[in-house]
Image (spheres, rainbow, N blue to C red):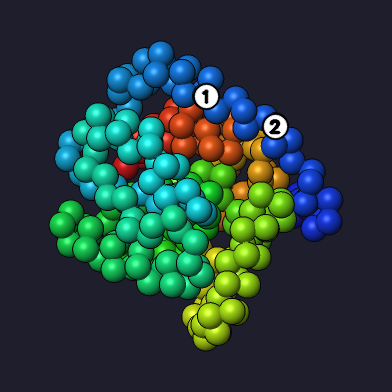
Amino acid sequence: MNEPLPRPAGALWGLVSRPSWRELRLRQEGRDLEAHPIWTGTGVPPGQGRHIVLVPGFLAGARSLSMLEPWLQRCGWDTRRAPVGRNHQPGEHVVELLEEWLAETTAMEGGPVPVIGHSRGGQEARVLAVRHPDAVSLLVTLGAPHRVLYPPHLVVRAPAAALQLAAWIRRSRPDLTGHRRYEADRVGPFPSSVPFVSVYSHSDGFLDWRLSLDPAAEHVEIDCTHLGLAASVPAFEAIARALKSL
């Protein structure tokens, strides 16, 4: 019987509870990564031209993958970055784009492909794997908020609220059916046939690490910034170990 997951900070305390100043380590994390043997592919399973889908984080877009994508390419992977822009649309709309992207990628590959999602992109990638388990050979999430739709931290909640207000001003009609389905798949049963690795950091400056825990996942704890979950030595080491299972 699985033990209950530890409870994250309450909603009010969660607004300010994260040590956001630690995100200033990101530049040093990047320098350390470029000086480490893993940056040149040492110890990384070669991609041999296989496809891999990458899903960026909330309001980050390609920026959040600016080191992960070229690293994977250097290691022989044919990266397919999801065309979701800054990833600021409602999750149900983003997943529709991902479903088309995944179908196109698996057709090119001739079979299932690994999917890596950073932050909100990991949450959306989980939904993708729930809906299309035969198309996903491995799911790796990096600092993904699996237990909430949006983390409570102000850095996330403020722009999320602004986007919701803008949609209300435009009188955009919400897709309530699609949203309910997204929410169900975000936390619902995960296919046992898909290996699922959730990587998180206790020193994440934006996300309470406990929000990244998922009953279906293998949990991997590392020490880095939130952005460094896609751009640091420990993150790349965790990804390399996960890829070895393919």
Mark 1 highlights which residue?
Answer: 27
**Alpha carbons under labels 2 and 1: distance apart:** 13 Å
Say which residue appears at 79% left-offset and 43% top-offset: 17
Query: Where is residue 137 shown, x and y percent of the image?
Result: 33, 53
Q: Quadrant of residue 218?
A: top right
Image point (45%, 42%), residue name: 64
Left or right: residue 23 compared with residue 124: right
**Residue annotated with mark 2:** 21
Residue type at numbered disc 1: Arg
Q: Residue furthest front?
A: 169
Q: At 80% across and 58% down in the image, what residue appears?
A: 11
Locate the C terminus by quadrant.
Answer: top left
Residue 101 in view in this figure: yes
Q: Secondary structure at mark 1?
A: helix
x and y, in percent, of residue 193 in the image: 40, 58
Q: Is residue 22 left or right of residue 185?
A: right
Crowd band around label 2 with a 10 angstrom C-alpha radius: few (<14), some (14–19), many (20+): few
Helix, strand or loop for disc 2:
helix
